[in-house]
Each structure stands twice: as structure tokens, then as C-alpha cells.
Image: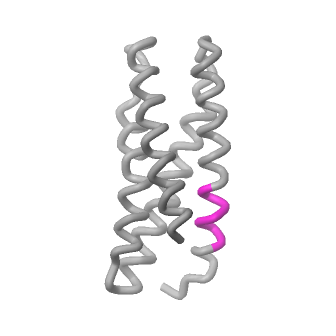
Amino acid sequence: MQELEDKTYNFAIKGLGFIKSLDKIDPQLNTGELKQYTGAVSLKFIAAMDSKENDDFAHNLRECHNNTIKILERLKNLNEIKEKNLKTERNQLITEAEEIIKNLDKIIEKLIY
């Protein structure tokens, strides 16, 4: 679980950096939701790990999962990026989001709550 916590944290940091770069290059892009979901991935996972109650754990884990899915959808829809470095960064974030979702799916399928 520590490894997944680290992955969600690193994903959030990289994602927020990517969004800042996007905002500098194309201020017209609406990145508000993307920022919100990206920051919440790590926060919800950490909240799940700190939960005292099983239902809080399950709720926070599902929220982390849902936020990651929303980020993945939005990243895949960012086709208008022309800068090579940002395209590469976007593709790396897509791969990481898919990995996080896969790991969260394994945990969620075992939840009782």
C-alpha cells in the first residue's frame, strides 16, 4: 500500500506540474477541473490510509479511483497539444493513471463496504 501511496502522490505532483505548463502555453484551456481531480487523487488515497473506519477507507479509496478515471478521460481528450515535451508528459501521465486505476481496481474488488 505504501508503494501505491507513493505512486498517487508522485502522479499528483507530476500532474499539477503538467497543468501549470499547459496553462503557460495555452491559457485558454480550462484546466480547473483537471487541477481539482489531480490534487484529490493523492489526498483521497492518504485519507483512505488514515481512516479509522472501514466505510471511510472504502469511500476515500473509491473517490481516489473516480478522480483518477476522470483525469485519465481528460488527459486522453487533450489532443490539441502541439509541443512535443508536453505530449510526452501527457502520455506518461496517461500510463501512470492507468496503472493506478488497475491497482485500485484490485483493492476495490475485495472491499465489503
- Is most of the magenta stretch helix, strand or loop? helix
Q: Quadrant of residue 59?
A: bottom left
Relative to 89, say whether 43 is above or below.
below
What residue sits 59% from the left and 66% below the top? Answer: 104
Q: Which residue is more in the foreground, 96 or 78? A: 96
Relative to 11, say whether 100 is above or below.
below
Q: Quadrant of residue 110?
A: bottom right
Relative to 43, say whether 14 is above or below.
above
What residue sits 46% from the left and 60% below the top? Answer: 64
Residue 36, position as x, y percentages in the image: 36, 43
Q: Which residue is more in the foreground, 101 or 8? A: 8
Residue 67, position as x, y percentages in the image: 47, 52
Query: What segment carries the magenta color?
Result: 100-106
What residue sits 50% from the left and 68% below the top? Answer: 2
Residue 80, position as x, y percentages in the image: 60, 16
| Residue 89 located within the stretch drawn in magenta | no
Colouring used for the render:
one colour
Q: Looking at the image, how many numbered discs can be counted on the residues?
A: 0
Decide if residue 51 is on the left or right side of residue 62. Answer: left
Decide if residue 3 is on the left or right side of residue 98. Answer: left
Q: Which residue is more in the foreground, 4 or 25? A: 4
Relative to 8, say whether 107 is above or below.
below
Residue 103, position as x, y percentages in the image: 63, 64
What residue sits 32% from the left and 84% below the top? Answer: 52
Decide if residue 91 is on the left or right side of residue 58. Answer: right
